[in-house]
Image (tube, grey):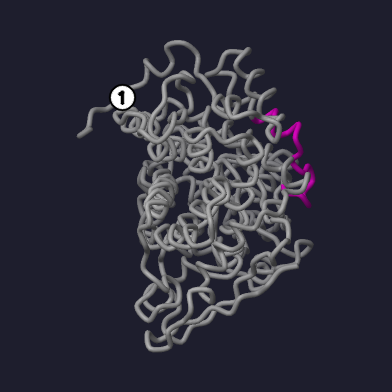
Amino acid sequence: MTVTHHVRVHRSDENLAREDQLAWKIAEVAADPVEVEQPVVDMIINRIIDNASVAAASLTRAPINAARAQAFSHPVSTGGAGANLFGAALDHRTSPEWAAWANGVAVRELDYHDTFLAAEYSHPGDNIPPILAVAQHVGADGRALVRGIATGYEIQMDLVRAICLHKHKIDHVAHLGPSAAAGIGTLLGLDVETIYQAVGQGLHTTTATRQSRKGEISTWKAHAPAFAGKMAVEAVDRAMRGQTSPAPIYEGEDGVIAWMLDGKDAAYEVPLPAAGEPKRAILDSYTKEHSAEYQAQAWIDLARKLGTENPSLRDPANIEAIVLHTSHHTHYVIGSGANDPQKYDPTASRETLDHSIPYIFAVALQDGGWHHVDSYAPSRAGRADTVALWHKITTAEDAEWTRRYHSEDPDVKAFGGRVEFRLTDGTTVIDEIAVADAHPLGARPFARDNYIAKFRLLAEPVLEPAEIERFLELVQRLPELTAAEVAELSIVAKPGLLESADAPKGLF
């Protein structure tokens, strides 16, 4: 059973009891000793594989090189054995907050792991790096790790269901700081009071503007969730030492809702599991077949279908205009409604092209597919026929697709839309798609074999065959793993690979 909590701003003189505060309710869910159900365990395994896949594909990219160099500039802290970094030797460790940082950047860099979209956006797999880092540091076993990750997904996704951040230009990782702190609290078996303080700090330190996802998108896009995970680890450490947090962090008259979100007269209805209710939220999330913004996934599938069936649609000479009729979010965030010239700029960064549905649709239409490296190459973005086609593509908000985007009914909820080609000969081509092929309701839903295939595809260039098999064998026994085995739940790059990557110098 789900309990819906009415959350509103309270004046200071109302003296809102902490037991009635949202942060306390979150902490109660995190401290609940309820067991994790088998379908949730299976999906957690899938998502750890998924995270390792996208981390492997990004091991030598510049943001990961920088984050890894920063992390390894810090020794293992005194309270435990430290944590692993993706790609590095298993016995080369760093302090858990820095492991959360570096691994969080690696997971997020290619925009290629799981997603959940509701009132807000989210990539709930971002919870895994900080929770796993702490598990390795303290010597937790696989069962404890599963419990912590289940909580991280549950809390972030429940906040995402209820509280819109982007309307107020607050970055979506503001829901990740509290969820990762709560997940770490579950992992460690902390009491409600301690988790409550950590959740408050997790939110207080991770509210930032969405400029990181606007205009010419910088490398900070990958660092933002990693920073939230690092802050969550530090918040838990402070709370365990008896340090307290601003409260009520959500409901206070100078709190987040009053001044960053809907204002002093606002109210939200936040769903959380009742006491004793299993945490099942992860089952409502979905991963990506393609390395692009989730709202582009279905459009890539439709574009490759149309281009394959009708190759003449790939030639800009045949096209007068292409209009993608879609949801409010897609139109204004990755479509022409964003009014960002960079979304049509052939020299734009990979991060910007990743958030341009006109570009993505043009390339997928012409190429009949999508590649996590080749589709973003400057030579690909600058191809004359692609630029000509790309500049004929616009988006338009459609009320019905917006309604479906926001629907709580999984059979109705959709992230696609309807495309209309107006051809130079006066004819039109119209088609539509509701969800990506890999979505649970799509043409080819992702299952364990697909997660493993994605891992093999992305890992083979950078991991030895034996290392691929070692990781896959280990992760699929997750709930049975000993603490020593959890300490090896990482991937080790081929000899010399990381050494060949540029390791920039900084302050540390």
* As drawn, 463 above or below 304: above
Residue 62 appears in the rendering: no
In front of the other: 86 or 170? 86
Q: Residues within 10 Å of mark 1 (few under 14, many from 20)?
A: some
Give the percent coordinates (x, y) of residue 285. Answer: 67, 52
Under circle 1, the secondary element is loop
Q: Say above or below: 30 vs 42.
A: below
Q: Residue placed at 76% from the left, 31% from the top?
A: 449
Residue 1 inside the magenta-drawn segment: no
Q: Residue at x 64, y 69 (%)?
A: 271
Q: Quadrant of residue 28?
A: bottom right
- Amino acid residing under circle 1: Ala
- Please indicate whether residue 208 sits to the left or right of residue 145 in the image: left
**Where, quadrant-wise, is the N terminus in this rendering?**
bottom right
- Residue corresponding to mark 1: 503
Which residues are drawn in magenta?
439-454
Residue 67 is at least partly visible in this image: yes
